[in-house]
Structures are given as structure tokens and as C-alpha cells.
Image (cartoon, rainbow, N blue to C red):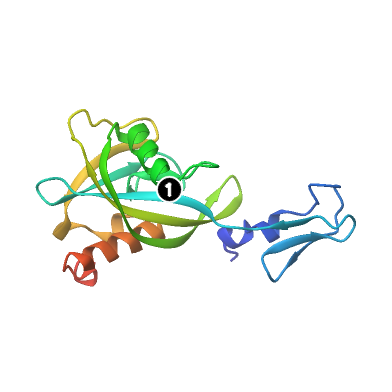
Amino acid sequence: MSDPVTNSFPQNVFKFCPACSSGNFSFRQDNSFLCDACGFEFFINAAAAVAALIEDDNGRLLFTKRAKDPMKGTLDLPGGFVDIMETAEDALRRELKEELNLETSEEVYFTSCPNTYEYGGITYFTLDLAFVCRVMSFEGITADDEVEGYRFIPIDEIDLGEIGLVSIRKIVSLYLVSKGIRPEERL
């Protein structure tokens, strides 16, 4: 049985040079493609994404429920992709406002975690940057169409198995460890 994610890796999908349309577009060991016909070179790089770790005054961590694939219906942290020419911090603020109508008063870098993200038959490689955030107020919190809903979960009751994306599961696991909770005890 073949792995759908592996089959959607760029080297298994991209067959023609985007510059000259030649079929001599070969994948190389350094994660790049080289066209033997025109010399065009294309590199596969990680896309940046952000995730927010937000606790309320009762020590509960804020999660969203994914409204779309990949991993539709699973828990996620608020966040999303960094736009071109946008800082990670600006992306975090924008995503929190778009997804949950929240504004931050503080964002502190926590960790990063690589991931793969399959969309439209192509696997994208991401680097998810997590920030511990404080929000100005939870008053007015509302889920937009990018998320199915949101939930506050006491940190000692978080079930990592409910989190769909591998990178987010790892980030939350590291966050639990930073709070003195051993995640393996929660599985």
C-alpha cells in the first residue's frame, strides 16, 4: 500500500519545468529541481506558520477545532500560515483576529516544530512557530468560518490524541512539560 503523503511530495508531482515546460525537470538531493533543458532551478523550502498557546485565568489552554482538511474535526491551536513579507508576530496577530476575534497584549516565542501539510494533492513542508500569548480580553471571542469552534481545556486534562497535526501535538507536549506535566501520563 502506498503512502498518500509520500505520493504527494513535490518530487512525485512536479514533472515539467515551469519556465520552459520541458519534461527534463529532475529532483536533486538538495531538495531542488533542475531543468536540464533551460537550467531553471527551483528549491523546495519550508513555509512558515504560527500557533498561539493561550491560557485563560483558570489555567485552561485555548484550542480551536479544525473546520477544514487536513485533519478536519481535530483540535488545533489558533494560528495559520505567515503571508509573504509578513513577520511571524504580525501573522499571529492577524490569525487570532481572523479566527477568534482576539487581540494579543503579549507574544513570546516558545518553540518551533517542522511538519508536513497535504493540500490539493501536494505536500507542503512547514515550520510551525509557537508563541505563548496573552490576550487583552476573551470578551467577544467568536469562531469564524476557518475554525469549527473553540474550547478551553484545563492543561492537566489535555488529550494529545485529540490533536490532529503532528507539529501541534509536539508543541502542546513541550508546553505541558514546561508546566510540569508529563504528556505520556495523559495518553
Q: Relative to residue 39, is residue 89 depicted above or below? A: above
Q: Residue at x 20, y 36 (%)?
A: 136
Residue 137: image quadrant is top left
Q: Relative to residue 96, is residue 178 depicted above or below? A: below
> Where's residue 21, x and y in %?
85, 47
The residue that label 1 is drawn on is 88
Q: Residue at x 27, y 40 (%)?
A: 104
Q: Residues within 10 Å of mark 1 (few under 14, many from 20)?
A: many
From the viewer's side, name the closer residue of 35 and 13: 35
Toward the left, the furthest residue is 58
Question: In the rendered view, does 49 fall on the left or right side of 136?
Answer: right
Q: Residue at x 69, y 60 (%)?
A: 11
Q: Relative to residue 171, is residue 66 depicted above or below? A: above
Question: In the rendered view, does 125 fall on the left or right side of 52?
Answer: right
From the viewer's side, name the closer residue of 180 and 116: 180
Amino acid type, mark 1: Ala
Residue 92: image quadrant is top left
> Where's residue 185, x and y in %?
19, 71
Residue 99: image quadrant is top left
Toward the right, the furthest residue is 37
Quarter of the N terminus within the rendering: bottom right
> Where's residue 177, x and y in %?
22, 68
Q: Secondary structure at mark 1?
A: helix
Q: Relative to residue 160, is residue 71 depicted above or below? A: above
